Image (cartoon, rainbow, N blue to C red):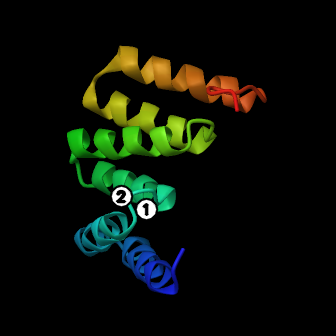
Amino acid sequence: MSDDLQDLFDEANGHLAVGEFDEAITLYRRCVAIDATFFDGWHALGMALLKTGHLKEAIGCGLQSVALQPNDLLAWTSLSQMYVRDGNIPEAESAKGNARILSLGGKVVKS
């Protein structure tokens, strides 16, 4: 990761920490525009969007996160939360199942 991207991400995290969600979202969007494979950027953007009630877009970011790192426990747990908030319980349960597999030391995608 470039220093510029790290600085931008750190700045976004600072805004998020003090409750400045719109500013954080803007900066997280810039992060993933710079590097579409930046897992932490997608995950953080999704969680910030979830906090602001932009559920469909949050789910899209969550799906991008699990596509980039399919064996990440936090990504699946977050995606499950996003689906719950959206009222999509079958998808929430499916994501939760993947998180459970990972929490027990399994893999969702074998290397």
Callout 1 amino acid: Gly
Is residue 110 toward the left or the right of residue 36 in the image?
Answer: right
User: On the image, numbered disc 1 is attached to which residue?
Assistant: 41
Q: Nearer the viewer, residue 35 or 40?
A: 35
Residue 53 x/y as whole percent: 22, 48
Callout 2 amino acid: Leu
**Outermost top residue:** 90
Residue plotted at (57% across, 20% down):
97
State the SS at label 1: helix
Residue plotted at (46% across, 38% down):
67
Q: Pointer 1: residues within 10 angstroms few (<14), some, or many (20+)?
A: many
Asked whether the residues under the numbered discs 1 and 2 touch, taking CB atoms below 8 Å apart as contact, a structural biologist would say yes
Q: How many marks?
A: 2
Q: Quadrant of residue 102?
A: top right
**Outermost right residue:** 105
Residue plotted at (34% across, 46% down):
61
Residue 14 x/y as whole percent: 43, 79
Residue 59 x/y as whole percent: 31, 39
